[in-house]
Amino acid sequence: DELIPFHGPHQAGIATPVQERLQFAAFDLSTTSAAEVTKLLKLWTAAAVRMTTGQEVGRGATGGATVPPDDSGETLDLAASRLTLTIGFGPSFFTRLNLPAPMKELPPFPGDRLDPARSGGDICVQACADDPQVAVHAVRNLTRMATGTARIRWSQMGFARAATSSPHEKTPRNQMGFKDGTNNIAIYDESKLNRHVWVGDEGPEWMYGGSYMVTRRIRMHLELWDRTSLRHQEDTIGRHKRSGAPYGGSHEFDPVRIHNLPPRSHVRLAHPDSNDGRRIMRRGYSYSDGTDSRGRQDTGLFFIAYQRDPETGFIPLQRQLSAGDALNRYIQHVGSGVWACPGGVRQGSFWGEALF
Ligand code: HEM
């Protein structure tokens, strides 16, 4: 069984191999007491250390016949399946605890239709694993431990990672049928990670080695997309559907030369050459939550991106996309979050310790 170490200079779940499944949860605090929050973060860290090494939480799933078991038990026969747990704090976390916030809320973007019930939150946990049962179990057990201090505001399940860890891995396809995650920051590319993903000494000390996470639930209008010709689909992305090659190239990893791509295509507008060299690290997943009351598929991309600073990462990029991307006809942003993910946890320490 492969384990991804929980401890280290950076939190696991950012520049570590991308697992197959996601369970994401946003929590609201029901307290303004830093002491209570610290207590929860200590409890959560201890549980995270156990779960990411395939152990049961607390006294386990069968720790005493007369009490509710500490661990809910559904992973008893399962391996850790590369579980990672990554924590982030939203702007409202800092307001609630009267601490200086390291970042602002995201600005509104044209075309957004954000549902408050699927946006924001004080704390988020990104659980990734190759087995969905392991990821769901992790969030469920953190949730029950939080009773009285924090409760779930919204959660999101994901599959088919829209990111790869290395170019040797096969790139998964998103729900539009296109390879998603081709041109991304690779987890071993230290220099790009240091430049675009990890917070340096410009931020508060507790963010050193951390990163800012942006999450967006992006719904796809698949009924419309599926009635769109292949040529138009490819023009919209700026890459070929089967091979994943950029316009002007013939293989997936051929370099993108933006002038070969249609002016309003997604890849052209998102590429660093159209953004003063700016890059983000994408780590999103597909979601499919059944159908809505009109029988339309409630499907899309749960976009996750990590960056050193949202003001120079996601925000200008999304401004450019929301203004001109041909893809906008087929998608709508319906949920949003921005999260300060502190630096890594050292042995014996706990999530966010340096903050208090
Ligand atoms: C690239 C799809 C939303 C940023 C791509 C690619 C596809 C794609 C198919 C090409 C393959 C690749 O390099 O990964 C989508 C879909 C979206 C979406 C279906 C919404 C449902 C976004 C958003 C952002 C973004 C919201 C950022 C604000 C990027 C970037 C690239 C990219 C930076 C790489 C461009 C390059 O350097 O070549 N996307 N994307 N995407 N996308 Fe998106």
Image (cartoon, rainbow, N blue to C red):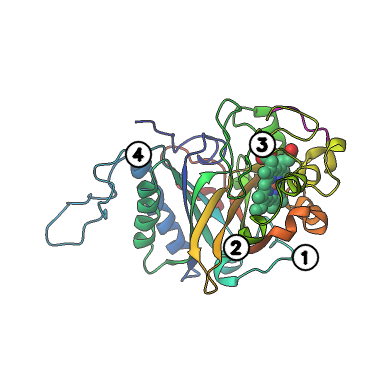
Tell me the amino acid under the disc marked 2: Phe
Query: Are dots 3 and 4 in contact, CB under 8 Å?
Result: no
Residue sitting at x 69%, y 35%: 183
Residue tagged 3: 184
Tell me the amino acid under the disc marked 1: Pro
Between the residue at mark 3 and the residue at mark 4, the CA separation in whole angstroms equals: 26 Å
Relative side of 264 to 66, left or right:
right
Considering only order in the chain, which callout, 2 or 4, is on the residue closer to the N terminus?
Answer: 4
Between the residue at mark 1 and the residue at mark 3, the CA separation in whole angstroms equals: 25 Å
> Mark 2: which secondary structure?
helix
Considering only order in the chain, which callout, 2 or 3, is on the residue closer to the N terminus?
Answer: 2
Residue tagged 4: 80
The response on whether ligand 1 sits within 8 Å of label 3 is yes
Q: Residues within 10 Å of mark 1 (few under 14, many from 20)?
A: few
Query: Are dots 1 and 4 in contact, CB under 8 Å?
Result: no
Between the residue at mark 1 and the residue at mark 4, the CA separation in whole angstroms equals: 41 Å
Query: Are dots 1 and 2 in contact, CB under 8 Å?
Result: no
Given this view, does label 1 or label 2 mark the residue nearer the observer?
1
**Mark drawn on residue 22:** none
Instruction: Please provide the residue range marked out in magenta.
Output: 253-257
Q: Residues within 10 Å of mark 3 (few under 14, many from 20)?
A: some
Residue 254 highlighted magenta (yes or no): yes
Between 338 and 259, the residue placed more toward the observer is 259
Residue 8 highlighted magenta (yes or no): no
Q: Residues within 10 Å of mark 4 (few under 14, many from 20)?
A: many
Tell me the amino acid under the disc marked 3: Asn
Which quadrant of the figure shows ligand 1? top right
Residue tagged 2: 94
Which residue of the protein is positioned furthest toward the top in this rendering?
Answer: 168
